[in-house]
Amino acid sequence: MQIERYDPGKPADETTRDAIAGFLEDHLDRFGDPKAHIRKAIDFALDPARGGAVIVGREDQGPVGAVVMNRTGMSGYIPENILVYIAVDRSMRGKGLGKVLMQAAIEGADGAIALHVEPDNPAKRLYDALGFTNKYLEMRLQR
């Protein structure tokens, strides 16, 4: 698998951004969001005023996995980064690709990384293995 990293210094073009958003929408399954929301997170990561990274794993020129991480603009009390999306192609799951993508995201990040994961998401095992801990219970007020 080849790893390609996009960031504000090396942004993806519009066609590539749409393709990554489409891949994520398709492969996030029930843990996903609409393509328009995913695209906003990608655009945020690649905006020089905001920052973050988009990491794509490719085989034979097609994506087999992707990660979107946004900078929070904070540090200390709020981690510097939030992992917004990660997905691996359904046909490639269980082969360690998610771990390779997460390691690339971790190595390229400045500062701490937060993520949200549902308790029944199989990816939780990967996050535990990589050293992520559960520090808080998230609560939201939807308006």
Image (tube, grey):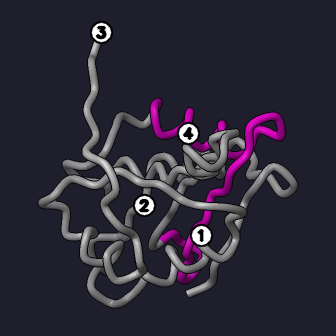
As displayed, is residue 132 above or below residue 37? below
Q: Find out whether the residues at labels 4 and 2 contact each other: C-beta distance under 8 Å.
A: no
Look at label 4 and name its amino acid.
Answer: Ala
Give the CA separation, mark 3 to mark 4: 20 Å
As displayed, is residue 45 above or below residue 1? above
Q: Magenta stretch: residue 37 in it?
A: yes
As displayed, is residue 128 above or below residue 118? below
* Outermost residue, front side: 77
Which tag is nearer the camera, tag 4 or tag 1? 1
Mark carried by residue 105: 1
**N-term mark: 1 or 3:** 1
Residue 86 x/y as whole percent: 42, 61
Q: Find out whether the residues at labels 2 and 1 contact each other: C-beta distance under 8 Å.
A: yes
Q: Give the magenta part as a residue range.
A: 36-63
**N-term mark: 3 or 4:** 4
Look at label 1 and name its amino acid.
Answer: Ala
**N-term mark: 4 or 1:** 4
Give the CA separation, mark 4 to mark 2: 12 Å
Instruction: Name the residue tied to disc 3.
Output: 143
Instruction: Name the residue tied to disc 2.
Output: 86
Quadrant of the snapshot with the C terminus: top left
Give the CA separation, mark 3 to mark 2: 26 Å
Quadrant of the snapshot with the N terminus: bottom right
